[in-house]
Structures are given as C-alpha cells and as structure tokens.
C-alpha cells in the first residue's frame, strides 16, 4: 500500500506539470523476482508473471538451446560456425566479422554473454538449427519443456519484435535450468571481460566485481524493454537468482537487483514454488520507450525512490572483490544505490579468437537446408560471395563499434572542439547513466527527442574510450587519393580536407 501511495502521489505531481500520459508511464511498476536456485522457492516477487520484452536476455535462451545441442551430441564446443550475410546485417552490439568467417561455438558463446553480440547470436542460431526460424522453433520447444508458458521467441538476439515476449517468472526458470542442467558451463555466465586481438570488452553486468557474491547471468536493453537483468549471487553455499525488468537506467537496474538479493539473503522467507506462480500465457508487453529513452531522469527518480536503501557490509566481500579499496575512507558498509557507481572492476580477460580450434578437422556449422544435419546440404547461395577464412586461429576483421564506443568517440571529438571554451556549471542529475544508448538522451533543439535508433545494450559503467584501428577522418584526408601523386593536391584542396576531417562524425545505429 505504501508503494502505491508514494507512486500515485508522485504521478499526480508529474501530471500537473508534464501531463497525465507521461505520469502514467512513470507510475507503472516494473516486474521483479528473487528465487532460491536449489529449491526453486520464490523469496520475493512483484508482477512476476507480467509479459515483458526480453531484449538481450533472449541470449540466455539461445545459450540454453546451444548447450542442449552439445549435450545431445549434435555439435561440439569446438565446432566452427560460419558467419552468414544475414548475421552481418544485424544491428550493434556486434563483433563485425566478415561473411564466411568462422568462430568456434565455445568462443561464440563467450562473445554472446560478454559482448552481447547480435551477429554472433544469429551465427549460433544458424550453426545449431540451420536457420534463425528453425532455431526459434527449438527455443519455443525448450521453453515449453521447461514450463516457460509465457515466452514466445522469434529471434535469437532480442532485437525488438513485438511478438517476442517473456516474464520474470519464465526468465527465473531459465536461469535456474542453466545452472542445474549445465553446471559444467556455469563459468559462461561469470566472465568479467574478454579479449580478442588487442581489444578488451568488459561485461555489462554491473554486479560482477561489486556486489559480494555476485557470480553471473546476463543483462539486456532496448527502449521498449527498458534495462533488464537476470543476476545470480551466492552466500554461504546458497545461490539466488534475481530478475529485474524495465528499469530506467543501468545503474537503477543494478541497485534494484542488489537490494533484492541482499534482502532475500537476510530474510529468506519462501512464498511458494516458482512453478506455482499463476500464468495466463503470453500477452502484449508494455512499451517503456517514454520512461526509458525519452524522460529518463524523472523515471529514474521515481524508480530509485522505490528501491530499498540497504547497506551492505563491505567485509562480506569475498577475496578478489575490491569493494573496500574502491570505497576507501575506512567505511564498513556501502549502500546498494552506490554500488553501480563504484569504479569499474579490473578483470583478467578471457581470451577468444576467430577461426578454428587447433587441430580441428570436423564439419563446419552454417546455414543449411531445413532438417539437414551439421555439415550437410549447406545453403550455398547464402555464401556465394563469401571469403572463407578457415584454419587455425585466423585473424579477425575489425570489431564493429557498439553504441557505447561510438558515443564516446563523438564525446571525445566534441570535447576537443570545445577545449578552449569556459566550462559551464554542472547540471544537477539523478543517477544519470552516461553510457546509455544514444536514444536515451534528448535530441538537440527545442521539444525534440532523439529517435530510438539502437537496440544495443549499454554498459553500466564508465570506461576509457576504446582505441579503434580504423583510420580517422584526419588520417584519411592526409592520405593521397589512389592513383594520384600527393604533389598534385593543391593547397586549397588540402585545406578543405582538413576542415572536413575536423567535423565530428555522425554515426547512426539501428
């Protein structure tokens, strides 16, 4: 009742200023759930059976089907998967591999969990199922077998599709099944960073390395879905899974999950079995775009007012979790609302590569005719213009930038251009996540909002801008045109190129 009163009062206040429709979107509660993995007991839940867009949490289902195929002997972790034209057309976040390039299932699953690469999700789907559509059928069949009665899957990566829905209840069932049925692969959900070539990609899970006992699972984000999270943590031999859906920012998502986990570890009162939660089947999911990608500041303030401000003892952190050093000042506890704002933890990255495993001589998994086994009846038309790069540990193409790295590049250029201008007074903000997708921030100009262009998932933390191997506009401008000597370029032309190179690039994502 208290929650309803606070939420209603806040919405009424907003309605008088911003209008009733906006306030209604802010007032909408979002689903959450905490379960005990061993027993399947529900420890806390709020709208756990409400239909929701999964975003990149879909990739947990993709991993489950792939691991089932490994268990059944249809594919191995060393089987190379071939990248198709369809995979390369996926929106960021992505690895950016070329058509015909190969990557082992083992490396692909790591890229899927850490980088949340949408092109790799399609590559896995085609390698395991033969096509995205056939793989989606396997996803739905696996969901029904697990009792996930509120889930419908149409793609393996979670890019927006109004038909693809799930619930906090179903995602908790899935997370529990991954731990119980595939314990030998539990490290896949607990990777803090991966390295491919000279590039390190950190996890998007803001609990890893910050919340004591956090040991895995997956994040997801799109504007319609909001910031989603399935998170696991273990204390004293007890593992819990928390599901948070529709948070307005990555920081808010992390704080909510930390509060749910900590309260559940302290109280531990079971409210019945997970499977016993009532389910009415899949329904239309709400669109969170207004509160997540257009009016995020007010939505975050309201959301955070509902997060219980629990203080977590720093001394409870296991070895290797540098909370005490990060907080400093001799403090003995930290608020869950401050966890996401701690410095990014430093993880030893897991090494991955493109290409075949050393000595592998088996079949290659790729898009193929319906019903064909791996290595049989490949869809040759799909790879007609491919340039296979098989062999052991073949070099990779430059990884495609995601929404975070592209925005940081633009921010760095803007900073260089305005370095000589006076620094304005900082604007007041509440838990503003600077690494949200481009659509999260208002567009330039009065009354205009930036359109939601990217379905990629942002990082929960601040990170140093990534070094990109591609030539900058300035370098491109300085290079003579092909077939023409540098001496033929006139002074005015060189000046024009320099001016063009100085302008920030406008990169669009979809």
Image (cartoon, helix red, strand yellow):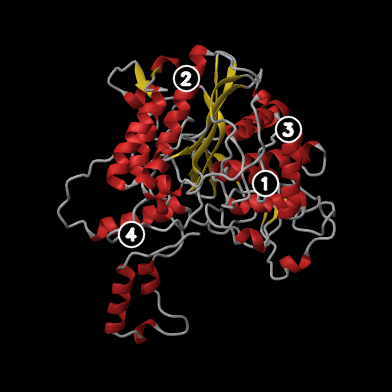
Disc number for residue 448: 4
Mark 3 or 1, nearer chain start: 3
> Which is in the foreground here, disc 4 or disc 2?
4
- The crowd level at tag 3 (other Cα within 10 Å; few <14, some 14-19, many 20+) is some
Which residue carries the number 2 mark?
A: 262
| Residue 390 position in % (x across, y down) | 71, 57
The alpha-carbon separation of the residues under discs 3 and 2 comes to 27 Å
Between disc 3 and disc 2, the foreground one is 3
Earlier in the chain: of badge 4 and badge 1, it is 1
Q: Of the numbered discs in the image, which one, if any, rests on residue 189? A: none
Element marked by disc 4 = loop
Residue 75 placement, left or right of 345: right
Q: Are marks 3 and 2 in contact (CB under 8 Å)?
A: no
Residue highlighted by disc 3: 146
Look at 38% across and 57% down and name the residue there: 450
Q: Which residue is mark 1?
A: 153
**What's the distance in space between the residues labelled 3 and 1, CA to CA?**
14 Å
187, above or below 488, in the image: above
- Nearest the viewer among 358 and 58 is 58
CA gap between label 4 and label 2 equals 40 Å
Closer to the chain start, of discs 3 and 2, is 3
How far apart, in angstroms, are the residues tagged by discs 4 and 1?
Answer: 34 Å
Viewport quadrant of the N terminus: top left
Question: Would you place residue 239 above or below residue 428 in this image?
Answer: above
Residue drawn at the location 44% of the way across and 28% of the way down: 210
The residue located at (33%, 25%) in the rendering is: 327
């Amino acid at each position: 009742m208290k929650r309803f009163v606070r939420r209603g009062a806040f919405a009424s206040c907003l309605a008088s200023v911003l209008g009733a429709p906006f306030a209604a979107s802010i007032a909408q509660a979002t689903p959450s759930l905490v379960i005990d993995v061993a027993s399947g007991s529900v420890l806390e839940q709020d709208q756990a059976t409400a239909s929701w867009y999964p975003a990149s949490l879909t990739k947990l289902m993709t991993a489950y089907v792939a691991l089932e195929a490994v268990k059944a002997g249809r594919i191995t972790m060393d089987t190379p998967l071939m990248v198709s034209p369809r995979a390369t057309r996926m929106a960021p976040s992505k690895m950016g591999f070329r058509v015909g390039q190969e990557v082992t299932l083992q490396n692909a699953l790591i890229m899927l969990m850490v980088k949340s690469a949408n092109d790799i999700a399609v590559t896995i789907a085609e390698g395991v199922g033969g096509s995205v559509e056939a793989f989606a059928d396997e996803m739905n069949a696996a969901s029904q077998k697990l009792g996930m009665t509120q889930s419908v899957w149409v793609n393996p990566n979670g890019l927006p599709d109004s038909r693809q829905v799930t619930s906090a209840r179903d995602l908790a069932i899935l997370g529990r099944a991954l731990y119980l049925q595939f314990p030998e692969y539990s490290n896949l959900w607990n990777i803090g960073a991966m390295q491919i070539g000279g590039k390190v990609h950190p996890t998007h899970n803001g609990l890893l390395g910050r919340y004591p006992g956090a040991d895995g699972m997956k994040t997801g984000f799109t504007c319609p879905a909001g910031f989603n999270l399935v998170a696991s943590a273990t204390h004293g031999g007890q593992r819990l899974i928390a599901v948070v859906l529709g948070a307005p920012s990555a920081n808010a998502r992390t704080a909510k999950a930390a509060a749910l986990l900590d309260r559940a570890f302290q109280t531990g009162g079971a409210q019945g079995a997970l499977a016993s939660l009532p389910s009415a089947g899949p329904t239309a999911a709400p669109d969170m775009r207004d509160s997540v990608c257009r009016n995020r500041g007010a939505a975050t303030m309201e959301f955070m007012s509902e997060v219980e401000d629990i203080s977590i003892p720093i001394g409870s952190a296991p070895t290797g979790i540098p909370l005490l050093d990060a907080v400093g000042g001799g403090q003995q506890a930290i608020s869950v609302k401050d966890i996401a704002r701690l410095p990014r933890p430093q993880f030893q990255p897991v090494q991955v590569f493109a290409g075949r495993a050393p000595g592998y001589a088996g079949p290659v998994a790729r898009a193929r005719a319906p019903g064909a086994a791996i290595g049989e009846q490949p869809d040759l038309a799909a790879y007609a213009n491919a340039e296979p790069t098989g062999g052991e540990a073949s070099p990779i193409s430059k990884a495609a930038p995601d929404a975070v790295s592209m925005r940081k590049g633009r921010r760095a250029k803007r900073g260089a251009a305005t370095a000589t201008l006076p620094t304005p007074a900082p604007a007041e903000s509440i838990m503003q996540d600077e690494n949200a997708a481009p659509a999260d921030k208002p567009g330039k100009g009065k009354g205009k909002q930036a359109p939601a262009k990217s379905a990629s998932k942002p990082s929960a933390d601040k990170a140093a801008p990534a070094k990109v191997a591609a030539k900058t506009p300035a370098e491109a401008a300085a290079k003579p045109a092909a077939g023409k000597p540098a001496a033929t370029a006139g002074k005015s032309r060189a000046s024009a190129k320099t001016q063009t190179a100085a302008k920030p690039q406008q990169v669009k994502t979809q």
